[in-house]
């Protein structure tokens, strides 16, 4: 069968980082992929490690070749790739467990030819979130090119590894890496690809961990003369790209912006390895689960596992919608709490304090996602000192609709993970038993 995604990883002397990279791929939530590991004449144990992965997992294929550089390795993998989509990684880096799933889902739901995602920039033990296009709508080629023009040398647009490509476009136009370019070769491939793509989408969630290492290809432009010569050649590609994408009048107006590329240098949103605002310690960028609790026994461990698994699928939704995890949790609670009509009841249902509930409701109201109204009960006896609780009335506003749709997808992912491997008969039996348990709990809590 044709895999949905071909994931391509060039490998050269990567024995220290390769396992982290490959493990992150093989542990993806999305399973329908092939992994092409291209051993580019490694002189360490990388080749043997690649072969071991291929023996252990049928989705892994290994290509051994003489050393020819990363572009040659990628081209050889493209010649053998079979997937509907293409995804690239460098062997120094790794991806989040939901990376491929989120990229493919975005491509399939939007019908886009290119999905571009946010990423994490890792320096030592510190990590920062690198964002880009904030428009969540489908972009035309011209609209995408306009965004790229604002920061032409940014890694967000230039690299391969934060994107998902449609292989049919690559093959139809025989797009390949230029083996003669040692700087910005990724960017040149992207420029060529964009010329043939029609629909583009930005995934507003970081899914890739980029680690800049010594000896990177950018640093290999050894002399000033080589750097200038290469940059002028790349600029010629860039200049011609905009002459094709824009009409003559628009190009004339924006020529100065195009020429900015000559003075800009490749940027990746780097973060210094110290604790500055906007950076986090590696491992704190997303919520994590305590291993001891995950493998624990008992009712509390069960509840913990369910909560952390749900959080795992809620968090990307929060990132995409520019919300915090507590805010997205409360939105989910509101979507299930139609029968709860007091702040006390809602706080209890959400498992938070009333003061926290008030803060979160205010934030969601300011974002124009919900409308909240406290209804004061009519008092028959004004002098009576007994407090009568105010009823809470809320409504979702139009801006909340895409968030609610994303939440529905997250809940479906949660259920799919819980019931992975269940037969239809087992699902029916579980539903029957779960309904009996629910009724027992309701009776006990009355």
Image: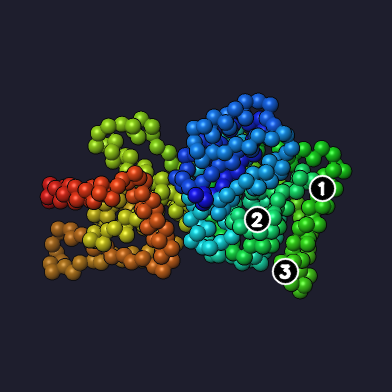
Q: Residue at x 33, y 53 (%)?
A: 357
Residue 397 sits above or below residue 134 on the image: below
Please name whichever residue, 100 or 285, is drawn nearer the observer in this view of the structure. Answer: 100
Query: Image height check: is 284 above or below 163?
Result: above
Task: Tell me if 154 is positioned left or right of 443 in this view.
Answer: right
| Residue farthest along the top direction in this orientation | 44
The secondary structure type at the circle numbered 1 is helix
Image position, residue 138 (x, y; %): 55, 65
Which residue bears the numbered disc 1?
A: 230
Q: Which class describes the residues within 10 Å of circle 2: few (<14), some (14-19), or many (20+)?
A: few
State the SS at label 3. Answer: loop
> Comparing marks 3 and 2, which lies closer to the viewer?
2
Q: Is residue 206 visible?
A: no
Choose mark 2 or mark 1, whichever is in front.
2
For mark 2, give the secondary structure: helix
Vertical position of residue 124 compared to residue 76: above or below: above
**What residue is shown with label 2?**
171
First along the sequence among labels 3 and 2:
2
Residue 231 visible? The answer is: yes
- The tag earlier along the polypeptide, 3 or 1, is 1
Q: Which residue is mark 3?
A: 246
């Amino acid at each position: 069968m044709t895999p949905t995604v071909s994931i391509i990883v060039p490998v050269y002397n990567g024995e220290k980082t390769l396992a982290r990279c490959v493990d992150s791929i093989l542990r993806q939530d999305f399973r329908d992929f092939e992994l092409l590991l291209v051993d580019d004449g490694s002189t360490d144990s990388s080749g043997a490690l690649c072969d071991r992965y291929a023996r252990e997992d049928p989705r892994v294929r290994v290509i051994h070749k003489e050393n020819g550089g990363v572009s040659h390795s990628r081209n050889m993998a493209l010649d053998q790739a079979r997937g509907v989509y293409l995804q690239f990684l460098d062997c120094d880096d790794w991806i989040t467990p939901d990376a491929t799933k989120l990229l493919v889902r975005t491509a399939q739901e939007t019908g886009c030819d290119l999905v571009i995602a946010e990423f994490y920039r890792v320096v030592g033990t510190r990590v920062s979130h690198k964002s880009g296009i904030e428009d969540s709508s489908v972009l035309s080629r011209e609209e995408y090119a306009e965004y790229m023009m604002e920061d032409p040398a940014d890694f967000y647009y230039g690299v391969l590894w934060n994107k998902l490509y449609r292989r049919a476009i690559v093959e139809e136009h025989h797009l390949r890496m230029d083996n003669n370019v040692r700087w910005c070769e990724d960017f040149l491939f992207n420029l060529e690809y964009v010329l043939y793509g029609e629909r583009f989408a930005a995934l507003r969630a970081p899914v890739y961990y980029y680690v800049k290492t010594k000896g990177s290809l950018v640093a290999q432009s050894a002399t000033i003369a080589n750097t200038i010569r290469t940059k002028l050649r790349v600029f010629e590609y860039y200049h011609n790209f905009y002459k094709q994408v824009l009409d003559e009048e628009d190009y004339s107006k924006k020529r100065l912006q195009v020429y900015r590329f000559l003075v800009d240098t490749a940027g990746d949103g780097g973060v210094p390895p110290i604790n500055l605002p906007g950076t986090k310690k590696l491992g704190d960028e997303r919520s994590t689960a305590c291993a001891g609790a995950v493998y624990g026994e008992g009712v509390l461990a069960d509840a913990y596992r369910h909560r952390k698994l749900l959080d795992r699928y809620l968090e990307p939704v929060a990132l995409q919608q520019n919300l915090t995890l507590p805010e997205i949790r409360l939105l989910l609670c509101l979507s299930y709490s139609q029968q709860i009509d007091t702040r006390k009841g809602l706080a209890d249902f959400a498992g938070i304090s009333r003061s926290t509930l008030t803060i979160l409701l205010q934030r969601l109201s300011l974002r124009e996602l919900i409308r909240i109204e406290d209804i004061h009960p009519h008092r028959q006896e004004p002098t009576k000192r007994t407090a009568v609780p105010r009823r809470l009335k809320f409504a979702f506003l139009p801006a909340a609709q895409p968030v609610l749709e994303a939440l529905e997808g997250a809940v479906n992912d949660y259920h799919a993970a819980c019931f992975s491997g269940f037969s239809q008969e087992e699902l029916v039996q579980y539903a029957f038993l779960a309904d009996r348990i629910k009724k027992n709990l309701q009776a006990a809590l009355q």
